[in-house]
Amino acid sequence: MELSERISRISVSSTLAVVQKATQLRASGVSLIDFGAGEPDFPTPENIKNAAIQAIHQNFTKYTPTSGIKELKEAIVGRHAKDFGSNYKIEECLVTVGGKQAIFEAVAATINHGDEVIMPVPYWVSYLDIVNYCGGKVVPLATREEDNFQVSAAAVGKLITPKTRLIIVNSPNNPTGAVIPDEEMGKLLALAVSKNLLLMTDECYCQFLYDGRKPFSLGHSGNRNNLIITGSLSKTYAMTGWRVGFALGAKKLLSNMLNLQSHSTSNPTSISQKAAVEALRGPQDSVQVMLAEYQRRRDKIVAGLRAIPGITCAMPAGAFYVYPNVGAYLKKDGVADCKVLVDRLLEEAHVAVVPGPGFGTDEHVRLSYATSMENIEEGLERMKKFFSEL
């Protein structure tokens, strides 16, 4: 059977590949330390779970409007307004099946074959494949580990051509944890306006910033023509499996994204939508509890990685990932590349991490510290021993 050309443009997610291998090892009885999956280890808060249970008992189990129930869209724009000073209307909000769907639909509704999309490197694994699938051309913006992977509007501006259509930024960033300064975000939007481009900001980790930094969104700008915001409840409220995301932007763009959604998934799960309303309108204490614990874990894992000879590691300013450079250990003892190193680390030390090539760099690995402090300490000990023997 012949497969389509467009499906050959995308690859298996490197994160998913690591998760699958880790699952197989764990099933065989191996004591595994898993830094692979970007998923909070905290349970969904009780008030959110209870809202879902109540929805089931009230038989809220039918189809809903494809764009999401009005109550949830009101909760999304209300929370965003309270947190960031934005003023979106419910007609400028689309509820999606996770944040990834919002990103996919926005790219699909925006670019034509051959259009260029600028994105900083390292990037989240799915950005590249989504753009490729939609027929676009990724224009990578190199960032430097020595500068904590910072992005500047000036550097973006140098990459713009007549074919440029879209700029994608993710702050805090997955995989590096880098945070783009508020002022620089403003410059990026001004650049998009001056060149008549669309700027997509992925706010998946927007509530998880460290060292006194305050959450920030360009949504307060009021711009609709050059800005689309995508977001998710998955990380903020430990709701990864509930699959609720959203997009905020121009009504015309969202209407066309909705057309695509109507022929793919239809509405997000009815029960999850009710849980999401409670997450957004209910107590926000759990967010601060997670943030404080993530910062404690961040400090521990960065110190531990930096203590391994030959490894360097930038300090993340947000999210819950570290992105250490392991280049000193490549080409050693049969380690041909980063993927081989990651496979050996998994098979020999039983520590799961994600190789950097999936994020656009060859000498890094990504570790998620959304796991217990005990796992972090044990994982660091195993890694220290593994690298000392290479």
Image: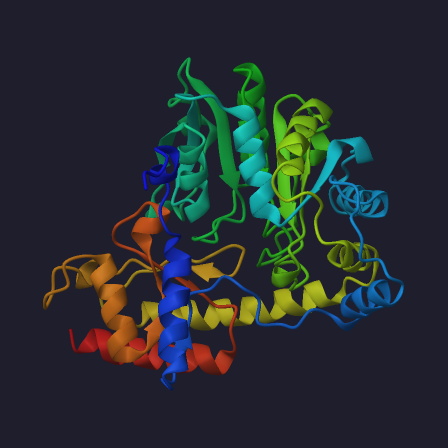
Residue drawn 40% across and 45% down? 149
Residue drawn 75% across and 31% down? 92
Vertical side of 95 occupied by 54: above or below: below
Residue drawn 35% across and 46% down? 11
Q: Position of residue 372 (x, y in %)?
A: 52, 78
Residue nearer the viewer, 204 or 247: 247
In the picture, the quarter occupied by the N terminus is: top left
Residue 126 appears left or right of 361: right
Vertical side of 96 occupied by 274: above or below: below
Answer with the quarter of the image where residue 61 lies. bottom right
Q: Specify the farthest residue to the top.
A: 162
Q: Position of residue 369 (x, y in %)?
A: 48, 68
- Looking at the image, how many numbered discs can be counted on the residues? 0
Q: Position of residue 330 (x, y in %)?
A: 17, 60
Answer with the quarter of the image where residue 142 lies. top left
Residue drawn 52% across and 47% down? 179
Colour scheme in use: rainbow
Answer with the quarter of the image where residue 287 lies. bottom right
Residue 308 visible in the picture: no
Residue 37 appears left or right of 94: left
Residue 172 visible in the picture: yes
Q: Specify the farthest residue to the front.
A: 1
Q: Position of residue 114 (x, y in %)?
A: 39, 21
In the picture, the quarter occupied by the C terminus is: bottom left
Q: Specify the farthest residue to the left.
A: 333
Residue nearer the viewer, 55 or 250: 55
Residue 358 appears left or right of 230: left
Residue nearer the viewer, 359 or 252: 252
Q: Specify the farthest residue to the right.
A: 58
